[in-house]
Amino acid sequence: MTTTALTVHTDIDGTSHPREAVLAWELDRARAALRLLKQRLGDDRTRELLTPDTTAADTALAAWAHASGGRWSTAVTELTAAGIDADRFLTWWQGRLHAPDRDALLAANPEHYLADSTGERVEIIETLGTGPARFFLRFHDDVPIAGPGHQAFPVRIGGTGTLADGTEVLRVMHEFADTPDGLRIRLTVQFPEAAPALLGTGHQWHFACEFANWLEAAARAA
């Protein structure tokens, strides 16, 4: 028998739909199912369920930070968007943090498990590398990250992520600038140099996912 590539077509009420249409429907419903589960679990239960993962991540991140001796590796993601400017996006995004809007913060990425911004620091549980990690992100102005051409970004929002015991395990810099038809965003993350490269490359895709979803949510809210 000759082997051919699998193709699947769906007919619903006489209308043919390609596989891509069913996958798009699946993604929408997967997001809805995940949102429901996160809402039902709540933050306390989520912390409890993920304690084995976050405890293991604490041990690994602390070891990498110690082995790195203050040296950092850097990963950068850039996005451009038309139809929304930096002020409009930042007003929405920072408003969600300050609200705090738990659903909007969690919905941006399937691997956002917890985002509690009720205090001075944002408590976060999300995937770093291959599994969930818990850290506390504090935004402040003196984060020592200056990417090439950073003067071209009028808005720079830096942050430092620490473990519960205060060990510094990541740094971020979010940069924003208007373009003729929208905005440009440069997102930088630094992990301890001894950490596996997967932390940096994985977070490049993590940034791409969450900020694109936040951009769409901000545009819809206008």
Image (cartoon, rainbow, N blue to C red):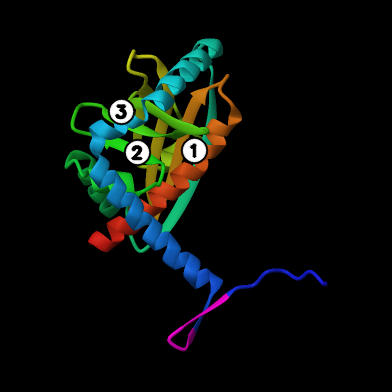
Label the magenta part by its dominant secondary structure. Answer: strand
The location of residue 154, given as percent across then percent down, is: 35, 42
For marks 2 and 3, the one nearer the N-term is 3
Residue occupying image coordinates x 48% and y 72%: 21
Tag 3 residue: 48
Q: CA distance from mark 3 to mark 1?
A: 24 Å
Q: Amino acid at mark 1?
A: His
Question: Please, what secondary structure does the residue beneath circle 1 have?
Answer: helix
The location of residue 67, given as percent across then percent down, is: 55, 11
Residue occupying image coordinates x 36% and y 25%: 51
User: Counting other residues with Cα less than 10 Å from the Cα at mark 1, is it few (<14), some (14-19), or many (20 or more)?
Assistant: many
Tag 2 residue: 113
Choose between 114 and 11: the one closer to the eye: 11
**7 lies above or below 201:** below
User: Counting other residues with Cα less than 10 Å from the Cα at mark 3, is it few (<14), some (14-19), or many (20 or more)?
Assistant: few
Q: Amino acid at mark 2?
A: Tyr
Question: Please, what secondary structure does the residue beneath circle 2 have?
Answer: strand
**18 lies above or below 87:** below
Residue range highlighted in magenta = 9-15
For marks 2 and 1, the one nearer the N-term is 2
User: Counting other residues with Cα less than 10 Å from the Cα at mark 2, is it few (<14), some (14-19), or many (20 or more)?
Assistant: many
The location of residue 186, given as percent across then percent down, is: 45, 43
Q: Nearer the viewer, mark 3 or mark 1?
A: 3
Tag 1 residue: 203
Q: Amino acid at mark 3?
A: Glu
**144 lies above or below 182:** above
- Residue 90 visible to an observer of this rendering: no
Disc 2 + disc 3, Cβ < 8 Å = no
